[in-house]
Amino acid sequence: MISWIQRSFQHHFRMVFGVMLVLLIVSFVVSFSPSSGIGRAEGKVMTRPFFDVNLASQADQQKVIGDAALSINLQAGYMGLENDQLQQYALQRYAALHLADQLHIPDPTPADLTTFVKTLRAFAGDDGQFDAKRYGTFRDSLKTNTRLSEGDVTRVLSDDWRASRVQELLGGPGYVLSSDIKTQLVQSDSTWTIAVATTDYAAFAPAIKPSADDLAKFFNESSLRYEIPPRVVTSYVEYPASSFLSQVTVSDAEVKAYYDANPARFPKPATDPKPAADAKADPAADFAAVRPQVVAALTFERAQRLAVKAASDLAYSLFEGKVAAPALDATLAAHKVTAKPLAPFTREAGPAELGNSQQIAEAAFKLGADQYFSDALPSPNGAVVLFWKETQPSRKPQLAEVRDKVTADYIENEKRRQFVELGKTVHTQLEARLKAGDSFEQAAAAAGSTLKLQAKTLAPFTLRQPPQDIDYSVLGALDRMEKGQVSDLLMAQDKGSFVYVIDKKAPDSSETSPAYLAAKAQLSGSIARYNTDSYLQELVAQELKKSEPATATP
């Protein structure tokens, strides 16, 4: 379809540029939550129309999500979205294609596709420009790929081109006020010359000894901070992976393949003395040095799979036999296993006995009287099945239960309050010394009796290109400062800072200046993208709402 590129890629070097794309796209599995409007909604909704596809169908999900994943990889050069973001992008992309059909936007011509391909980050060289060699290498890789074809890529590129035409129509010119452009220009391109004085908060150690009344008052005023969240009480049956190790055998080829697929997990042991700089790498020796660890890891992984299968068999037996909670002990005895109790745990912490696993905690909080046992769940030592006892509601503890935490919080709160109060005093001292003619360094040194300050003057900079090591609390303070001003005490992590603006030079903000025109283009583009995203989000929401499961009325 793109003839000159097709001719060129036949003569380029064979590389594996498309491997990452294929791995991410092929067999892409996304777990859609019922709240997203996609999927079966606990098995009750078998269809979920979305324009001309059924989002409850695995095939249609693959079509929508798989094409979107390939689109992201081609446009960004890597998979830069999490699952939820990819889902949102996929739905908006498909909505844009639906609009393209309604607006009768035609398929791109070969010339259109050629121009479009040149804009994709996936085919950009180190200089950011289109690299025909990289594109050709990618096309070469498709010849031997059994799951991703040149036709798939061409289809996705054509759809992306049509979607981009829709986005241009929806975004419009991106109107922006001249005053907004000038404000943005002054904020990003003003040249700042500042001095910063810092003090170590960690070294500030006032003597704070709260009384019982102080703690009681602080506890009552901050009671929500100490509320104990809901906790679930469960027991569990564990299938240790160690019990299945004897059933696992691994071949030399499997061990080597496992090592090659996970090299970062098995770093080469440190050597003493260090090898010479010109020493040649020896992959075989590197593998031999870590082979025992690789064998152990692969063996445990396979043993854990067997443990999960055994746990799954138990859970299925309980489900298939419709075993009620009172008959659980007898059923477990028949399976020659025993349930062990877990200490009550929260959703955030998870059971300490099982490595504070978040996956296990989430599963536990889905259980209740109607569904008292879980599916098989991987655990640090193998696999488990959980059994629900009760879910304890949140409650406010007595002061005695959390006295140590309340005391620590009170001391930290009082320390920060005193630190801020000293900061106000130092701020007044700095302003007075500066008005008297001292430099900022001299003023900071004079305030050392109250707070020890270390002052330095930074080279001129703009917010568009700030110093690499500057604290962002300092940059945030500049938005509300002018030449000659000293900031209040700024708190960031374990230090406090004062900022003094030595000079501020605003850029040329005339409407004919290059900087103004560049800022206008940037803001207009941002507004156009916002308009497009807002419209497509609303369109997606409306389409999903049409097929939402009906809510039963009491």
Image (tube, rainbow, N blue to C red):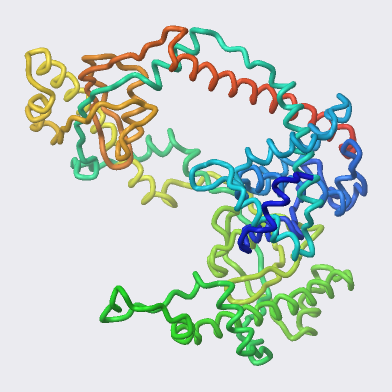
Give left or right: position of 486 versus 59.
left
Residue at x 38%, y 36% (from the top left corner) = 218
Give left or right: position of 332 versus 284.
right
**For this rendering, which residue is in front, 27 or 329?**
27
Q: Is residue 382 above or below residue 537?
A: below
Res. 452 in view = yes
Give left or right: position of 406 versus 517.
left
* Image quadrant assignment for residue 147: bottom right
Res. 390 in view = no
**For this rendering, which residue is in front, 385 or 57?**
57
Q: Position of residue 442 (x, y in %)?
A: 7, 26
Pick the quarter of the image with the N terminus: top right
Q: Is residue 235 above or below residue 80?
A: below
Q: Position of residue 471 (x, y in %)?
A: 32, 36
Give left or right: position of 261 versus 224.
right
Q: Position of residue 132 (x, y in %)?
A: 62, 48
* Image quadrant assignment for residue 310: bottom right
Pick the quarter of the image with the C terminus: top right
**For this rendering, which residue is in front, 204 or 521?**
521
**For this rendering, which residue is in front, 176 or 7?**
7
Q: Is residue 472 above or below residue 253?
A: above
Residue at x 75%, y 44% (from the top left corner) = 2
